[in-house]
Image (spheres, grey):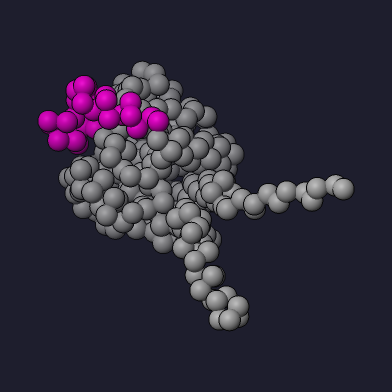
């Protein structure tokens, strides 16, 4: 009788495990979002290199590394040079029920003086207010493609949603993911460390998973813009992002794995 019950007991134990523990047993599902596309070209380098092209090239490399090295299931918001509105990127991501979301962009400065001077990598996660003027400028530039009714990001409803979001585990994990990726990027590239920052990026708002936006460099800088065009440098970026994702997933799986039950010591006579 006992032997017949063993398979049933095993099934019951599996069903009682937390869903996060069962998720840890399957390949990670990751949405990679190449910024811009189609008639939305993004920023431009001094030699005419377009952000939309660099972001797609790097995103494809990230996808390949995630699949080959982590065995992840990777879904791209766009696979080619096509226009894709920001709301559709969020909607697509949530339909996939991903474990995390990574949006890839290149940064830029507006004036000749700042274009010649400013370079480096920034990694963002969502916040109702920007960390500083640089973060605000980056969000404003990337949000320029957002629907006009929500592009301003200043309404009280959004502020309330983001305030509530700050208390969720997904938002805390977004911070952890941002730091994990950023540290690997700086170590791998030697690029100027412009920090992990927070800003109200449209594409991060509403994603129902840990979500980050990576500005992989200033395409407007004469030297960094040139590096972003090179396959070898793109490979370094993609490998670093993959290693950051690997570190984040390992941390989450350790945290969410079932803890062994404590057994009371037998009472001494």
Residue drawn at x 23%, y 28% is: 158
Q: Which residues are magenta?
A: 142-167
The answer to which of 213 and 55 lies nearer the viewer is 213
Q: Position of residue 52 (x, y in %)?
A: 29, 45
Q: Position of residue 155 (x, y in %)?
A: 19, 23
The answer to which of 178 and 94 lies nearer the viewer is 94
- Name above or below for residue 122 compared with residue 50: above
The answer to which of 183 and 107 lies nearer the viewer is 183
Queried whether the magenta region covers residue 222, the answer comes back as: no
- Name above or below for residue 97 compared with residue 163: below
Q: Position of residue 184 (x, y in %)?
A: 56, 42
Main structural element of the magenta stretch: helix, strand or loop?
helix
Q: Position of residue 185 (x, y in %)?
A: 53, 40
Residue 59 can be seen in this image? no
Queried whether the magenta region covers residue 143, the answer comes back as: yes
Residue placed farthest to the right in the image? 269
| Residue 38 left/right relative to 212 | left
The answer to which of 223 and 172 lies nearer the viewer is 172
Residue drawn at x 52%, y 29% is: 193
Residue drawn at x 56%, y 46% is: 255
Q: Quadrant of residue 188?
A: top right
> Where the N terminus falls, by quadrant?
bottom right
| Residue 83 left/right relative to 107 | left
Residue 80 can be seen in this image? yes
| Residue 147 left/right relative to 244 | left
């Amino acid at each position: 009788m006992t032997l017949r019950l063993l398979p049933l007991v095993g099934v019951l134990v599996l069903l009682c495990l937390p869903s996060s523990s069962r998720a840890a047993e399957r390949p990670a599902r990751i949405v990679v979002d190449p910024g811009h596309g189609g008639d939305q070209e993004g920023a431009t380098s001094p030699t005419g290199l377009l952000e939309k092209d660099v972001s797609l090239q790097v995103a494809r490399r990230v996808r390949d590394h995630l699949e080959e090295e982590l065995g992840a299931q990777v879904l791209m918001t766009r696979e080619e040079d096509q226009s894709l509105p920001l709301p559709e990127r969020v909607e697509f991501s949530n339909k996939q029920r991903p474990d995390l979301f990574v949006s890839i962009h290149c940064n830029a400065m507006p004036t000749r003086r700042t274009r010649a001077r400013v370079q480096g990598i920034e990694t963002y996660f969502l916040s109702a207010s920007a960390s500083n003027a640089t973060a605000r400028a980056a969000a404003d530039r990337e949000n320029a493609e957002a629907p006009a009714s929500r592009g301003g990001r200043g309404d009280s409803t959004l502020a309330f949603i983001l305030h509530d979001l700050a208390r969720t585990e997904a938002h805390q994990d977004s911070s952890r993911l941002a730091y994990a990726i950023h540290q690997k990027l700086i170590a791998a590239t030697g690029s100027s460390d412009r920090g992990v920052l927070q800003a109200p990026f449209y594409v991060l708002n509403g994603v129902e998973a840990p979500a980050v936006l990576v500005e992989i460099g200033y395409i407007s800088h004469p030297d960094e813009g040139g590096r972003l065009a090179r396959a070898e440098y793109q490979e370094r970026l993609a490998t670093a992002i993959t290693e950051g994702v690997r570190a984040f997933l390992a941390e989450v799986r350790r945290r969410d794995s079932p803890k062994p039950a404590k057994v009371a010591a037998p009472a001494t006579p």
